[in-house]
Amino acid sequence: AAHPMTPNLGQGACQAIEDAVVLAHALTAGDGPAAYTAARLPRTTAVMRRSHRVARLTALSGRVPVTARDTLLRLAGLLGPTAVLRQGDMLFRWRPPA
């Protein structure tokens, strides 16, 4: 498995661990590499895209883009911790295959 992931979400090692768990499950169940790929591709693609979005947001420069970003982040904070934490659900609520 190789996921071109930026380090912005700290998910590189996490995805590697998930990969190992899902691969072991697929091989143990006799499903093989195709099942592993089918199981992992949607999640790793979503995490990779989210990481790239965060990278672009943190790399903004110029007064207007930076002010807009910072204002949006402040407004998101006003929604309360539940709304903000819900954005991490996709990352933190992963469950291994049964």
Image (cartoon, grey):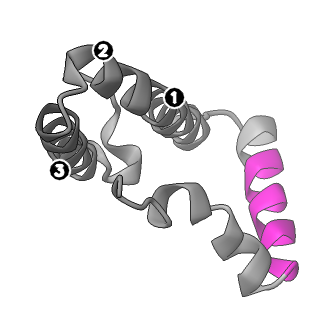
Q: Amino acid at mark 2?
A: Ala
Quick check: 60 above or below 45?
below
- How far apart marks 2 and 1 lie (CA) works out to 13 Å
Residue 4 appears in the picture as rendered: no
Q: Residue at x 17, y 29 (%)?
A: 30
- Pick the front one: 46 or 32: 32
Q: Residue at x 72, y 85 (%)?
A: 81
Q: Residue furthest front?
A: 30
Instruction: Determine if the magenta segment contains residue 4.
Output: no
Q: Badge 1: how crowded within 10 Å, few (<14), some, or many (20+)? A: few
Q: Position of residue 55 (x, y in %)?
A: 49, 36
Name the disc covering residue 42, or none. 1
- Image quadrant assignment for residue 74: bottom right
Q: Which residue is mark 2?
A: 34
Q: Amino acid at mark 3?
A: Ile
Q: Which residue is mark 3?
A: 17
Identify the element where label 1 is drawn: helix
- How far apart marks 3 and 2 lie (CA) works out to 18 Å
The span picked out in magenta is 67-79
Q: Position of residue 61 (x, y in %)?
A: 61, 34
Identify the element where label 3 is drawn: helix
Q: Badge 3: how crowded within 10 Å, few (<14), some, or many (20+)? A: few
Q: Position of residue 54 (x, y in %)?
A: 55, 42
Verify CB contact (< 8 Å) between mark 2 and mark 1.
no
Horizontally, residue 78 falls left or right of residue 84, namely: right
Quadrant in the picture for the C terminus: bottom left
Q: Residue at x 48, y 57 (%)?
A: 91
Mark whose residue sits in front, 3 or 2 = 2
Q: Earlier in the sequence, mark 3 or mark 2?
A: 3
Quadrant in the picture for the N terminus: top left
Verify CB contact (< 8 Å) between mark 3 and mark 1.
no
